[in-house]
Image (tube, grey):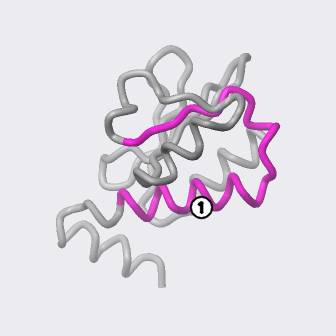
Amino acid sequence: MLDLTFNYCLSFPGVTAEEKWNEEMCFSVGEKLFCSMRVDPPYKLSFKCTPDQFHSLIARPDIVPMPYLARYHWVQVKHPSNLDWSELQAFIQQAYDLVVKMLPPEERDAVLKARV
């Protein structure tokens, strides 16, 4: 699951990956973080979501508000392997899209053009 997630995050246009914060691989677009994952056990995955999703996700087992980023509607999945891969892909795609929408117009346009 770790390799799949890593490769999936990097498949989006304009994404960069950088290791930060005690073995956390951080995925950004336009220097804005949309997803992070712990690269050593215990594996954890964190991502941005909508306010509505935030509340429904943290009601699920093994999903908690992400420390320091919960106020921005970030969740942390304590055991990513417990999620269905297609559901996880949808959450990551949405996190990416949410961040792209918040980019300054010039950056957003450049990312969107790279998608085509």
Q: Amino acid at mark 1?
A: Ser
Q: At which x and y percent is residue 12?
A: 53, 63
Residue at 61% x, 37% y: name it: 59
Prevailing SS of the magenta stretch: helix
Q: At which x and y percent is residue 58?
A: 57, 36
Q: In the displayed orientation, state which residue is furthest to the bottom.
A: 116
Q: Read off the magenta span.
A: 73-99
Q: Is residue 78 left or right of residue 33?
A: right
Quadrant that contains the N terminus: top right
Label 1, on which residue?
11
Q: Is residue 31 above or below residue 60?
A: below
Residue 15 picture quarter: bottom left
Q: Is residue 62 above or below residue 48?
A: above
Local crowd at mark 1 within 10 Å, few (<14), some, or many (≥20)? few
Assess whether residue 93 is covered by the magenta stretch: yes
Residue at 47% x, 66% y: name it: 13
